[in-house]
Image (cartoon, rainbow, N blue to C red):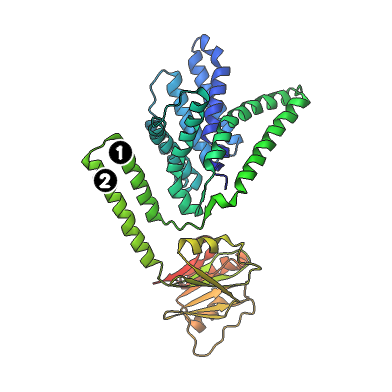
């Protein structure tokens, strides 16, 4: 909500500051024979020790890999190109952890860094303040705005909201974070040596509390948070298309770059029309919710939810689906044993295990609340096209049902592993 999670998350800014600190502390080693090589090895050891101690998340692995390459190039007197450094770090990270490609933090980190190194210099040249303090504030502001250009499209896709006060929180935290991190290392060292003055410890804690209080205040300014923004993957792609076209137009003002921008704008218009058309299509969804059953029926822009939750407002998957699919009206109802969608029949079997209904041959059977049934007998009796198990069932039951379906060569869908079951036009 405050628009500062990319700064407070342990990632590039932290690792970059640590590299500067470690490089300064280890500088005397350079005077010894082969000192530069020893220093590089120690820097790499310290950076990666910190990375694993901090939890080895996607963002910190990315940052440690990138700054390791920077450290090697810096101390071997080799020129480093930031785009080459980013490409090498992406290559090595995905070589060992390919699934990081789908990690939200990984995507946001790289998009923010790429935007900063490509867009920030352009923004900074737009105004040259003469006062030193004003110049520093403008520099931080351009970094923040550039980073937002990189992350806004994909943030809207994942979170469907935009923090309007991101610039204010970023201006405050970026200068403060370097002081906090450096002071924190000093506090830890003094604490380990058992010579930490109480006044210093209290002062450090007060600064942290002050920072948290500031972010809590920013996050509570609800009127500046734009929520419920529908933004699909096609919008993400065309948004980056427009950003790239604008940057290229600024750097090369010619007919080709202008054509590229016009094509990007027309693409957004086409996708907007297509999205509006597709949002009117119907769908039937069995969501995954641990210990509960949640079913949704979409008709045009209306959505009816059948569930056994205490309240629907706290279930984020529904809220996300509603926003992503341009739904304007939501109604609720209790769970029913039989649902019809188009020419398909969906039968729900709960803990009572009742399914002996004459002349009924459902296309799909949803097992919920761990019914004690003989699945072989059920399949022989109802002849369904597919068996579905939602999050309300015991895992041991799901495993047994899956084994039975494999033997019978019958499709089996468990929402816990495969996600929501969706029927649509």
> Compared with residue 114, is residue 194 higher up or lower down, i.e. above or below?
above
Q: Residue at x 78, y 26 (%)?
A: 198
> Compared with residue 280, is residue 126 higher up or lower down, i.e. above or below?
above
Compared across the picture, whether 258 is left or right of 288 comes to left
Between 416 and 268, the one nearer to me in the picture: 268
Between 170 and 401, the one nearer to me in the picture: 170
x, y percentage for residue 344?
Answer: 44, 79
- Residue 106 shows in the view: yes
Which dot marks residue 260? Answer: 2
Closer to the N terminus: mark 2 or mark 1?
1
- How dense is the environment of label 2, judged by Cα within 10 Å: few (below 14), some, or many (20 and up)? some
Compared across the picture, whether 27 is left or right of 309 comes to left
x, y percentage for residue 292?
Answer: 62, 68
x, y percentage for residue 244?
Answer: 34, 42
- Find the residue positioned furthest to the front: 130
x, y percentage for residue 255?
Answer: 21, 41
> Compared with residue 190, is residue 375 higher up or lower down, i.e. above or below?
below
Query: Which quadrant of the figure has residue 269?
Result: bottom left
> Compared with residue 9, is residue 85 higher up or lower down, i.e. above or below?
above
- State how far apart marks 2 and 1 are (Cα): 9 Å
- Residue 93 shows in the view: no
Q: Secondary structure at mark 1?
A: helix
- Find the residue positioned furthest to the right: 198
């Amino acid at each position: 909500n405050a628009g500062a999670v990319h700064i407070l998350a342990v990632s590039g800014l932290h690792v970059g500051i640590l590299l500067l600190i470690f490089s300064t502390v280890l500088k005397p080693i350079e005077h010894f024979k082969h000192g530069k090589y020893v220093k590089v090895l120690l820097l790499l050891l310290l950076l990666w020790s910190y990375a694993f101690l901090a939890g080895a998340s996607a963002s910190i692995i990315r940052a440690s890999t990138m700054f390791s390459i920077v450290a090697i190039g810096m101390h071997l007197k080799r020129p480093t190109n930031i785009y080459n450094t980013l490409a090498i770090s992406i290559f090595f990270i995905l070589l060992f952890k390919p699934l990081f490609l789908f990690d939200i933090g990984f995507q946001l980190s790289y998009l923010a860094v790429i935007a900063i190194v490509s867009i920030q210099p352009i923004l900074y040249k737009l105004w040259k303040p003469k006062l030193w303090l004003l110049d520093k504030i403008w520099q931080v502001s351009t970094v923040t705005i550039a980073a937002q250009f990189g992350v806004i499209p994909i943030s809207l896709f994942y979170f469907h909201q935009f923090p309007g006060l991101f610039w204010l929180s970023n201006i405050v935290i970026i200068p403060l974070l370097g002081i906090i991190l450096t002071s924190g290392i000093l506090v830890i060292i003094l604490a380990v040596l058992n010579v930490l003055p109480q006044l210093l410890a209290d002062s450090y804690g007060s600064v942290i509390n002050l920072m948290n209080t500031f972010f809590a205040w920013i996050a509570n300014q609800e009127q500046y948070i734009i929520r419920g923004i529908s933004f699909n993957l096609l919008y993400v792609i065309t948004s980056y298309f427009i950003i790239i076209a604008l940057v290229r137009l600024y750097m090369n003002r010619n007919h080709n770059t202008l054509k590229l921008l016009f094509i990007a704008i027309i693409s957004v218009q086409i996708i907007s029309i297509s999205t509006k058309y597709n949002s009117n299509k119907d769908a039937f969804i069995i969501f995954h919710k641990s210990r509960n059953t949640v079913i949704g029926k979409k008709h045009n822009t209306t959505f009816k939810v059948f569930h056994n939750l205490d309240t629907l407002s706290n279930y984020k998957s529904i809220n996300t689906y509603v926003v992503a699919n341009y739904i304007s009206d939501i109604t609720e109802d209790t769970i029913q044993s039989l649902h019809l969608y188009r020419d398909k029949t969906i039968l729900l079997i709960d803990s009572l295990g009742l399914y002996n209904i004459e002349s009924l041959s459902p296309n799909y059977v949803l097992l919920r609340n761990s019914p004690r049934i003989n699945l072989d007998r059920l399949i022989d009796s109802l002849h369904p096209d597919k068996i579905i198990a939602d999050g309300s069932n015991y895992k041991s039951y799901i495993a047994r049902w899956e084994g039975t379906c494999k033997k019978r060569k019958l499709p089996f869908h468990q929402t816990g592993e495969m996600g929501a079951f969706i029927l649509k036009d």
